[in-house]
């Protein structure tokens, strides 16, 4: 077994020692920590890794992770662009309480948001 501290220098995003607890929690299945880690990878431009963590959190009905996955599918970041999957994840996120996804769906209904953009 590898120590997380031993592989920290090889990770594709910068992490400090205090970030280790979140990584351990994410690896143990904590949906909130998985979503947080997904966001960290997404913002670092490591979209495939981000999608991995978002999928794990979304499988546990984490609304924000579902909304982030919608953005990944919409922009083809870490996955092949797919408007249908983007809409599915957006709708699921909204149904699970994501205020951002709810606003995006409302904007779609009113013609203020273009899914193809």
Image: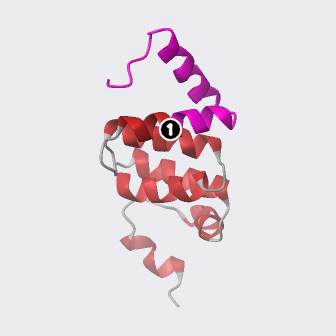
Where does label 1 land, which residue? Answer: 88
> Residue 108: within the magenta?
yes
Q: Secondary structure at mark 1?
A: helix
Residue 36 or 19: which is nearer the viewer? 36
60 is higher (above) or lower (below) than 64:
below
Quarter residue 100 falls in:
top right
- Residue 71 shows in the view: no
46 lies left or right of 2: left
Locate residue 91, reporting x and y percent. 56, 33
Q: How would you classify the magenta stretch by its main secondary structure?
A: helix
Residue at the spot 52% in from the left edge and 40% down from the top edge: 89
How many neighbours does mark 1 have within 10 angstroms: few (below 14), some (14-19), or many (20 or more)?
A: some
Q: Which residues are magenta?
A: 90-117
Residue at the extreme bottom of the image, as rendered: 1
Locate residue 4, reporting x and y percent. 52, 78
Residue at the spot 36% in from the left edge and 51% down from the top edge: 47
């Amino acid at each position: 077994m590898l120590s997380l501290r031993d592989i920290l220098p090889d990770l594709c995003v910068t992490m400090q020692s205090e970030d280790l607890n979140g990584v351990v929690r994410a690896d143990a299945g904590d949906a909130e920590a998985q979503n947080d880690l997904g966001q960290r990878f997404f913002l670092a431009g490591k979209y495939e890794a981000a999608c991995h963590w978002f999928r794990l959190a979304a499988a546990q009905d984490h609304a924000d992770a579902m909304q982030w996955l919608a953005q990944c599918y919409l922009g083809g970041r870490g996955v092949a662009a797919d408007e249908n999957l983007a809409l599915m994840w957006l709708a699921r996120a909204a149904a699970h309480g994501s205020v951002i996804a709810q606003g995006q769906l409302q904007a779609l209904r009113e013609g203020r948001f273009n899914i193809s953009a």
